[in-house]
C-alpha cells in the first residue's frame, strides 16, 4: 500500500493554486493538459477536506469549472459544419474550452509578478530610515551686516572731494589755528546731532559741513563718520546715483553708548 503525504501550502485563491501546479510540473500555460491538472487540483481539495480545513467557495467553483472543461474535452466532438463562402468550403473551428481559463491564468501571473516586484521594493525601502527635517536656523552662521553696504568707496571719495573743494577758498597757508578738534570730539558732536532724535533719524552728509569750515575740520568730520559706521552707530546710503549721502542713526538714543570710544586721534 502506497502512502501519499501532502504538504499543503497556503494559496491566495484557486488561480494561485493552478499556477503553482503549472509551474511545479513545468507545464506550458498555453497548452494545459486539463485532465492532469484537474486530477492534481482535486487531490489538493480532497487533502484539505481530510485535514478538515475550511475550503472557500471559490476553490469549489474552480473545481467545478475544471471538471466541466475536462468533460468537454473527453466527450466526442460534435460534427463539423462546412460553410460555403467565396467558392470555397470553410470548416467551422471549434473553440478551445481552455481558452478563457488560460487567459485568466496569464493575467494572474502578470499581476502576481508585479506584486512580487512591489514587495521587493517595499522590503528594500523598509531598510531606509528617515526623520522629519529640523530647523537648523540657530546653527547657521550669520555674517555681520556691512555698514556701508550699497555704498561704494568712490561715493565717499566724491563726497569728501566736494567738501574739500567748498572749503578750498577758506584754507590759507599762513593761518594757524590753536583750537584743534579731535576725531573723538567730532564723533560725539555727530552722534549728539543724530542720536537726539532717536533710532532711525536721518541727516544729509552735506548738512554737517558749511562753507566756513577749514580743511582740517572737514577731514576730522569725515573720519568721525567712518568711525561711527565702523561702530555700527550709523549707516550711509544714497537714494539715487550721485545724490547726497544720507546718514541714518542706528545706535542708542543720543550718545549713551559712545562713552567708551576707543579713538585717540
Image (cartoon, rainbow, N blue to C red):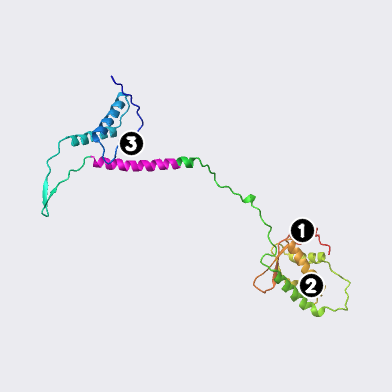
* Image: 23 above or below 187: above
Q: Are marks 2 and 3 in contact (CB under 8 Å)?
A: no
Question: Pointer 2: residues within 10 angstroms few (<14), some, or many (20+)?
Answer: some
Residues 147 and 213: in front is 147
> Which badge, 2 or 1, is on the more N-terminal residue?
2
* Disc 3: which residue: 23
Q: Main secondary structure of the magenta part?
A: helix
Q: In the image, residue 239 lies at what x, y percent? A: 65, 70
Left/right of residue 49 with respect to residue 74 in the rendered view: right
| Residue 206 appears in the picture as rendered | no
The residue at the point 79 percent across, 71 percent down is 219
Q: In the image, residue 175 lies at what x, y percent? A: 88, 77
| Residue 186 appears in the picture as rendered | yes
Magenta region: 98-121
* Disc 2: which residue: 218
Q: Secondary structure at mark 2?
A: helix
* Disc 1: which residue: 257
The residue at the point 33 percent across, 36 percent down is 23
Question: Pointer 1: residues within 10 angstroms few (<14), some, or many (20+)?
Answer: few
> Which badge, 1 or 3, is on the more N-terminal residue?
3
Amino acid at each position: 500500500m502506497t502512502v501519499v503525504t501532502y504538504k499543503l501550502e497556503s494559496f491566495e485563491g484557486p488561480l494561485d493554486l493552478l499556477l503553482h501546479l503549472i509551474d511545479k510540473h513545468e507545464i506550458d500555460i498555453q497548452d494545459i493538459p486539463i485532465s492532469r491538472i484537474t486530477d492534481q487540483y482535486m487531490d489538493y481539495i480532497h487533502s484539505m477536506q481530510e485535514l478538515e480545513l475550511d475550503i472557500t467557495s471559490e476553490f469549489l467553483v474552480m473545481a467545478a469549472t475544471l471538471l466541466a472543461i475536462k468533460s468537454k474535452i473527453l466527450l466526442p466532438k460534435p460534427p463539423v459544419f462546412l460553410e460555403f463562402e467565396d467558392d470555397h468550403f470553410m470548416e467551422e473551428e471549434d473553440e478551445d474550452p481552455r481558452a478563457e481559463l488560460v487567459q485568466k491564468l496569464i493575467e494572474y501571473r502578470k499581476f502576481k509578478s508585479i506584486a512580487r516586484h512591489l514587495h521587493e521594493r517595499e522590503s528594500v525601502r523598509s531598510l531606509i530610515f528617515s526623520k522629519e527635517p529640523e530647523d537648523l536656523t540657530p546653527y547657521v552662521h550669520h555674517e555681520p551686516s556691512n555698514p556701508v553696504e550699497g555704498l561704494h568707496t568712490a561715493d565717499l571719495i566724491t563726497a569728501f572731494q566736494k567738501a574739500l573743494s567748498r572749503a578750498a577758498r577758506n584754507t590759507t597757508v599762513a593761518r594757524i589755528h590753536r583750537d584743534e578738534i579731535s576725531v573723538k570730539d567730532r564723533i560725539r558732536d555727530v552722534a549728539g546731532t543724530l542720536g537726539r532724535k532717536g533710532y532711525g533719524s536721518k541727516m544729509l552728509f552735506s548738512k554737517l559741513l558749511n562753507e566756513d569750515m577749514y580743511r582740517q575740520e572737514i577731514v576730522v568730520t569725515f573720519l568721525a563718520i567712518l568711525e561711527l559706521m565702523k561702530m555700527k552707530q550709523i549707516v550711509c546710503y544714497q537714494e539715487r546715483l550721485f545724490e547726497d549721502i544720507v546718514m541714518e542713526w542706528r545706535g542708542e538714543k543720543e550718545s549713551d553708548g559712545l562713552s567708551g570710544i576707543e579713538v585717540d586721534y
